[in-house]
Image (cartoon, rainbow, N blue to C red):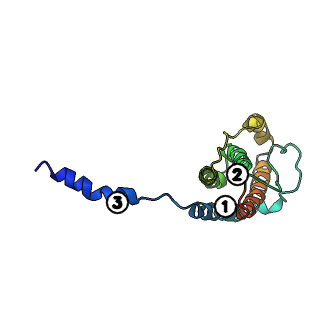
Amino acid sequence: MHWRPLWGFLWLWPYLFYIQAVPIQKVQSDTKTLIKTIVTRINDISHTQSVSSKQRVTGLDFIPGLHPILTLSQMDQTLAIYQQILINLPSRNVIQISNDLENLRDLLHLLAFSKSCHLPLASGLETLESLGDVLEASLYSTEVVALSRLQGSLQDMLWQLDLSPGC
């Protein structure tokens, strides 16, 4: 009678060693799929088409623009800033996008870990301290510009992921 739990555990033992890590190609594929999903969500918000991601808007310089070459660390940093901006917008349109950015950052951390990279904590968020004043003055413009630039940044990241970015 006392041997029954031991035999049950020993029977499961080979299966415990069979568990494998998720292949990095799967993580990279999931990352690309999530980027495409976020871009689609931004496209579904009709008023984001009215501003070019390259257009300069006075007072909104804290919103990241396009970067020609991105490392995983720079991607994470950029997404952290966008996530901070979106969290502070009262629009219901951006809640899911903000949650998706958090998931995307987690996937980027997995990609970095697979390359033995250590992504530092996102810095530069202190520049967003004045965000409240900007939102009060130009809420609609901030949302439109942020989403437009985020969309451009995500498309750059999608392209960079095919090139296997560095740390």
Q: Nearer the viewer, residue 22 or 104?
A: 22
Query: Which three-letter amino acid code belongs to the residue tagged 1?
Result: Ile
Q: Is residue 8 visible?
A: yes
Q: CA distance from mark 1 to mark 3?
A: 34 Å
What percent of the width, then of the height, locates residue 64? Answer: 80, 48
Q: CA distance from mark 2 to mark 3?
A: 34 Å
Marks 2 and 3 close (CB-CB < 8 Å): no
Instruction: Give the residue number, with chain letter if any, for mark 2.
Output: 72
Secondary element under disc 3, as helix, strand or loop, is helix
Decide if residue 165 is on the left or right side of residue 12: right
Q: What is the tally of numbered marks visible in this picture?
A: 3
Query: Which three-letter amino acid code belongs to the residue tagged 3?
Result: Tyr
Secondary element under disc 2, as helix, strand or loop, is helix
Are there few (<14), some (14-19), or many (20+) residues within 10 Å of tag 3? Answer: few
Decide if residue 1 is on the left or right side of residue 167: left
As displayed, is residue 133 above or below residue 113? Answer: above
Are there few (<14), some (14-19), or many (20+) residues within 10 Å of tag 2? Answer: many
Residue found at x 80% / y 50%: 141
What percent of the width, then of the height, locates residue 146? Answer: 76, 51
Instruction: Give the residue number, with chain letter if any, for mark 1.
Output: 35
Query: Which three-letter amino acid code belongs to the residue tagged 2?
Result: Leu
Secondary element under disc 1, as helix, strand or loop, is helix
| Mark drawn on residue 15 | 3
Label whose residue precedes the other's in the sequence (2 or 3): 3
